[in-house]
Image (cartoon, grey):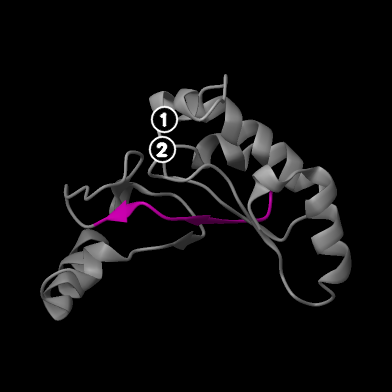
Amino acid sequence: VHISSGLAALKAVKKVAGSIKIIGVTTLTSLNNKDLKLVGYNRTVKNLVIHQAKLAKKANLDALVCSPHEVSFVRNIFKKEIITPGVQIGKRNYDQKRSMEANKVRSDWLVIGRAITRGNIKKNIQNLSKEFR
């Protein structure tokens, strides 16, 4: 559930979820401070994600999605699982504005998409495993 849906929506989803885990999505990794301004936000990415983490905590969500750049700030607020997209193999960035090399990300779960599926998948997976050695 995107956290921008608001606290009432987050609590309502959590209330009806039963045993289903609810994951809150913060600001997309394809956005930076300039992009946020263009869509009407006055906060920086960092401050917005911190605010979103507080909402996720208040709604008692089960996990949170945030970019690699916000993990350390979010961990101070949200004590449950953190899932991180925008993870890359080596220095390739693709179209993400807030991404990081896999071996530098300190998250519970990593979402690695194009870095694996673009090109030779077997070779990309081997390169990824080398990053963690």
The residue lying toward the viewer, choosing from 84 and 17, is 17
**Residue at position x 51%, y 23% in the image:** 44
Question: 65 above or below 22?
Answer: above
- x then y, percent, for residue 33: 43, 25
Question: 1 above or below 30?
Answer: below
- x then y, percent, for residue 91: 16, 47
**Residue 67 seen anywhere in this rendered image of the structure:** yes
The magenta segment is 79-88
**Image quarter in which the N terminus is found:** bottom right
Q: Check if residue 82 falls in the magenta segment.
A: yes
**Residue at position x 59%, y 39% in the image:** 74
- Label 1–label 2 contact, CB within 8 A: yes
What is the three-letter code of the residue carrying label 1? Answer: Asp
Checking the image for residue 132, the label placed there is none
- Cα separation, mark 1 vs mark 2, equals 6 Å
Dot 2: few (<14), some (14–19), or many (≥20) neighbours within 10 Å? some
Q: For residue 53, which quarter of the picture?
A: top right
Q: Main secondary structure of the magenta part?
A: strand
Q: Which residue is mark 1?
A: 35
**Residue 77 seen anywhere in this rendered image of the structure:** no
Indicate left or right for 43 with 118 as reference. right
Q: Which residue is mark 2?
A: 31
What is the three-letter code of the residue carrying label 2? Answer: Leu
Q: For residue 18, which quarter of the picture?
A: bottom right
Indicate left or right for 132 with 42 as reference. left
